């Protein structure tokens, strides 16, 4: 299989997949609890009474907090950059589909959320927001945030927008009810600098396009924070571009982590992760084809070869730590861009983790 570099999932002698403009994702690629998961929380300290979600309504970024009791739900949500909470009440119907009503400060209903499919965390749940009468319908995305801060720490959304050029960006900042640590301040400066660099790279052909970036907190503890940034870029080229980038910061050591920091020196974690990624992409492709065939009333098509081989895997474009494993990101050509994001459980690579290292402390056997 060749010699693998320490910082990429690419054999040193294998050809690289050429980077190309990417289409927007057709399906939401998820791990465990995501898109809109109402399952019991993991061991990070979130309780069923305080789940946090981030996402969007149309092209507007939102943050939502929901409490779940049986099939009843209540909570609030707000738009980034505005911050005014809107009240939510609702339920899961007998098929597990979400229905929420939204109320303004005067107690009058101002909108509703409806999901057309069961929220099983696998395929896009087809959720929409509309006015109470069903008009002005907009597509909704939501993903659970994994936050376990204590001692007054929290993450708040900050925004950068420019209507003239079409820029709309949300990025995270750590705040505290007390004095903010130097490491938290360093994280804040780093994520802001990376965000600003990404915006500088936006050069629409006619001076106006669409540049949308939102974030997810894949892991947030007093010691470590791992952020996923989802970027949609349309500058007037042949295809819109979609990419993920990330930042994982060790707050206890006050440093940005590299991928190799997670593993024992000289261990062959690359091969284990690459094999899993290739197999998981094929598994998801089969699921997508089966779903498309069902919707189109035909038999699923069979593939003779994998979507991508281990020798064809492009260099990692990013990675992040989650409570259940690692998220790894690639920059595939737009025709297979739906597979840019893969969740890899700890069981795949736990034997290679550095004892006491950043990821080892969160692994679940």
Image (cartoon, helix red, strand yellow):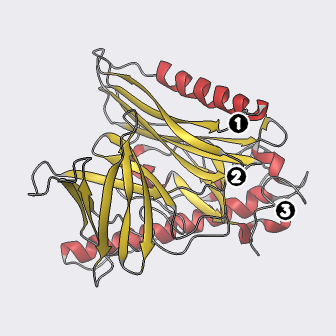
Q: Residue at x 86, y 54 (%)?
A: 357
Could you say which is closer to the camera, residue 198 or residue 151? 151
Q: Nearer the viewer, residue 350 or 331?
A: 350
**Percent x, y of residue 104:** 24, 49
Q: Which residue is mark 2?
A: 150
Q: Nearer the viewer, mark 3 or mark 1?
A: 1
Q: Is residue 247 left or right of residue 260?
A: left
Mark 1, Cα crowd under 10 Å, few <14 / some 14-19 / many 20+, is few
Q: Is residue 175 left or right of residue 160?
A: right
Q: Which residue is mark 1?
A: 178
Q: Residue at coordinates 34% horizontally, 36% vertically from top-left?
A: 240
Q: Nearer the viewer, mark 2 or mark 3?
A: 2
Q: Is residue 329 left or right of residue 82?
A: right
Q: Position of residue 45 (x, y in %)?
A: 65, 64
Residue 75, which numbered label? none
| Quadrant of the image containing the N terminus | bottom right
Q: Position of residue 139 (x, y in %)?
A: 26, 52
Q: Which mark is residue 352?
A: 3
């Amino acid at each position: 299989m060749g010699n693998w570099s320490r910082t990429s999932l690419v054999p040193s002698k294998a050809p690289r997949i050429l980077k190309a403009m990417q289409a927007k994702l057709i399906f939401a690629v998820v791990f465990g609890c995501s898109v809109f998961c109402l399952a019991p929380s993991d061991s990070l300290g979130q309780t069923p009474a305080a789940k946090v979600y981030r996402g969007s309504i149309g092209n507007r970024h939102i943050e939502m907090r929901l409490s779940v009791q049986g099939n009843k739900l209540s909570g609030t949500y707000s738009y980034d950059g505005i911050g005014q909470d809107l009240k939510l009440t609702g339920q899961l119907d007998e098929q597990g589909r979400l229905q929420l009503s939204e109320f303004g400060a005067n107690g009058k209903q101002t909108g509703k959320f409806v999901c057309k499919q069961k929220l099983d965390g696998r395929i896009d749940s087809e959720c929409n927001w509309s006015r109470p009468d069903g008009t002005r319908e907009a597509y909704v995305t939501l993903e659970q945030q994994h936050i376990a801060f204590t001692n007054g720490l929290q993450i708040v959304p900050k925004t950068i927008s420019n209507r003239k050029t079409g820029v709309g960006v949300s990025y995270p900042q750590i705040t505290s009810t007390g004095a903010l640590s130097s490491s938290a301040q360093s994280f804040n400066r780093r994520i802001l600098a990376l965000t600003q660099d990404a915006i500088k790279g936006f050069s629409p052909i006619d001076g106006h396009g669409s540049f949308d970036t939102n974030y997810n907190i894949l892991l947030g503890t007093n010691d470590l924070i791992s952020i996923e940034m989802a970027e949609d870029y349309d500058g007037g080229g042949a295809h819109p571009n979609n990419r993920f980038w990330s930042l994982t910061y060790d707050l206890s050591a006050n440093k940005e982590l590299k991928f190799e920091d997670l593993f024992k020196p000289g261990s062959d974690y690359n091969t284990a992760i690459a094999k899993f990624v290739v197999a998981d992409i094929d598994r998801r492709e089969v699921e997508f084809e089966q779903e498309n065939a069902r919707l189109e009333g035909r038999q699923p098509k069979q593939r003779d070869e994998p979507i991508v081989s281990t020798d064809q895997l492009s260099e990692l474009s990013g990675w992040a730590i989650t409570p259940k494993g690692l998220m790894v990101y690639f920059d595939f050509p737009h025709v297979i861009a739906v597979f840019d994001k893969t969740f890899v459980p700890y069981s795949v690579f736990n034997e290679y983790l550095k004892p006491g290292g950043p990821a080892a402390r969160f692994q679940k056997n």
